[in-house]
Image (tube, rainbow, N blue to C red):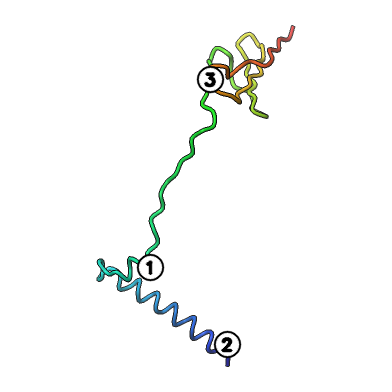
Amino acid sequence: MAKDRYTKAVLTVIAAALVVIAVQPWLPGSRLLEIARPESAQAQTTVPKYDLTIPKAWGKFIAFSNNTLLLEASDHAYRVVDVEGKAPEYPRIKALLRFQ
């Protein structure tokens, strides 16, 4: 008995919502529909913490880990570049590796 009443109540709410959706095109200025309508979503972007430019002369990008870049130069030297900071101090070269 209780299940039957619950089912009828849920179906009544669904039917009422469907009627409101169906009537919406014929009542564009209805105040009731404006209250029920959610607000439109606004796109929000975050500003990057750091905005850095790395010279191409430093080399080709190989890897990124722990806020450091690994770059390979044309002479096969590797640069470890720290990128966590603000210009003009950053980016800075933490290590330069050359193999002979």
- Specify few, some or many for label 1: CA neighbours under 10 Å numbering under 14, 14-19, or 20 or more: few
Residue 90 vs residue 7, the one in the foreground = 90
Q: Hey, which residue is sitting farthest right in the picture? A: 100
Q: Secondary structure at mark 2?
A: helix
Marks 3 and 2 sit apart, C-alpha to C-alpha, by: 67 Å
- Which residue is label 1 attached to? 36
Q: Is residue 24 above or below residue 60?
A: below
* CA distance for labels 1 and 3: 49 Å
Who's the residue at 48% across and 84% down the image? 9
Secondary structure of the residue carrying tag 1 is helix
Q: Amino acid at mark 2?
A: Lys
- Identity of the amino acid at label 3? Ala
Q: Residues within 10 Å of mark 2 (few under 14, many from 20)?
A: few
- Give the secondary structure at mark 3: loop
Q: Could you tell whether 50 is left or right of 81 in the image?
A: left
Residue at image location 58% in from the left, 19% down from the top: 91
Q: Earlier in the sequence, mark 3 or mark 2?
A: 2
Image quadrant containing the C terminus: top right
Q: Amino acid at mark 1?
A: Ala
Q: Residue at x 53, y 89 (%)?
A: 5
Q: Earlier in the sequence, mark 1 or mark 3?
A: 1
Where is 6 relative to 39, above or below? Answer: below
Residue 87 is labelled as: 3
Q: Quadrant of the N terminus?
A: bottom right
